[in-house]
Amino acid sequence: MIIDGKEISNRIKEEVKREIQEFGYKPRLAILMAGDDESSKVYANSKVKACESVGIEAKVYYFSEKEEDKFFDTLEKLNEDKDTHGIMIEMPLPKGFDVDKVYDTINPYKDVDCISNYNMGRLFAGKPLFVPCTPKAIIHILENTGVDLEGKHAVVIGRSNILGKPVAKLLLDKNCTVTVCHSKTKDLAYHTKQADVLVVAAGKMNLVRGDMVKEGVVLIDAGINVHEGKIYGDADFESIKDKASYITPVPGGVGPVTTAMILKNTLEAFKYAVKSL
Ligand code: NAD
C-alpha cells in the first residue's frame, strides 16, 4: 500500500488549526536563515505558508553570510521575546558559522526541531521537550499503518543527529530490535533483507532496490535527492512498491508529514509558554 503523506499531514494540520482557534491567540514561529542557499529560501517560505494555513504567525529572519554576530544577537533576543514561541534555524548555515554555538544558544523551550544539545540529551533520556520533526513524522506514519511494531526488526539507514539517530531511539522506544546502518556499513543488503521495517535516511538516490528487501517490508523513505529537476527518495520506488506492505513515496510521503510536525511542535512550544505565565 502506498502511504499518502499529504492526507496524514492534512489531518494533523486540521487538529492543530482547531486547537489554535480554541486558544484564540496566534502562536509565533521565528525562522532564522543565513546565506543565500536557494533551497533553504524555498524551505523557509513553504514553512511560512504552512504556518499561515493553520493560524501560526511565522517570520523569516534573513542574514548574509557575513552577519554571524547579528544572527546570534537576534537569536538571543528571540530566546527572550515573550511573543515568539518557536524558533527554527534553516540548515545548512554558511561555512564559518559556529553551529555548535547555535545548539548551545537556542532556548530549549522554543527549539521546535530539537536541535539543541540539551534537547537531544532529554530525547535520549526518554524525557523529551520536543521530538525532532522528521523522526516524529516517521514514527507517526508507522503508527498510522496500524502495524504492531513490538518485536519487529527495524533497520535504519543513516545515523545523523537530526534523523537517523533519533529515529533509531524512537523505534527502540516502540520495542523494535534496531539495526543502524551507515556509510561504513559492510554489505548493506545483508541488513536490509532482514528488515521488517526499513527507514532510509541517507540522501543517496537508488540506495535501496527491490532485491535488497524482503516481501512485506514497511519502507519509509526520508531521502530527498534532486535529479534533473525532479525529486527522488533514497529507495527505488518502482522495484520495491509491489514487494512492500507499506511504502512512502517521494515526494508526498515523509515530507508533508514533517511540515505538519513543525506546526504541531510550534503549538507545543506555545503551550510551554502559556504554562510558564
Ligand atoms: P546526513 O548527510 O547528515 O546523513 C546521512 C547519513 O547517511 C549518514 O549517517 C551516513 O553515514 C549515511 N549514509 C550515506 N551514504 C550511505 C551509504 N551509501 N550507505 C549507508 N549509509 C549511508 O543527512 P541527513 O540530514 O540525515 O538527511 C538524510 C536524508 O534525509 C537527506 O536526503 C535529506 O535531504 C533528507 N531529509 C528529509 C527530510 C524530510 O522532511 N523528508 C528532513 C531532513 C532530511
Image (cartoon, rainbow, N blue to C red):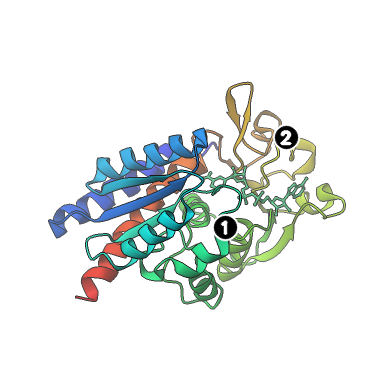
Q: Does residue 268 appear anywhere in the picture?
A: no
**What SS does tag 1 mark?**
loop
The residue carrying pointer 1 sits among few (fewer than 14), some (14 to 19) or many (20 or more) residues within 10 Å by Cα, namely some
Q: Nearer the viewer, residue 54 or 67?
A: 67
Under 8 Å from ligand 1: the CB of mark 1? yes
Disc 2 residue type?
Asn
**What SS does tag 2 mark?**
loop
Q: Report the residue at 50% width, 42% height from top.
A: 35
Coordinates of residue 50 in the picture (x, y in percent): 33, 41
* Disc number for residue 29: none
Q: Quadrant of the N terminus?
A: top right
Q: Nearer the viewer, residue 185 or 143?
A: 185
Q: Is residue 111 left or right of residue 103?
A: left
Coordinates of residue 175 in the picture (x, y in percent): 60, 70
Q: Does residue 269 appear anywhere in the picture?
A: yes
Q: Nearer the viewer, residue 163 or 87?
A: 87
Q: Report the residue at 67% width, 39% height from top.
A: 234
Under 8 Å from ligand 1: the CB of mark 2? no
Label 2 belongs to which residue?
A: 206
Coordinates of residue 133 in the picture (x, y in percent): 46, 55
When asked about the image quadrant of residue 85, the answer is bottom left
Disc 1 residue type?
Ile
Give the mark toward the camera: 1 or 2. Answer: 1
* Disc number for residue 162: 1
Q: Nearer the viewer, residue 1 or 56?
A: 56
Determine whether 200 is above or below 22 in the image. above
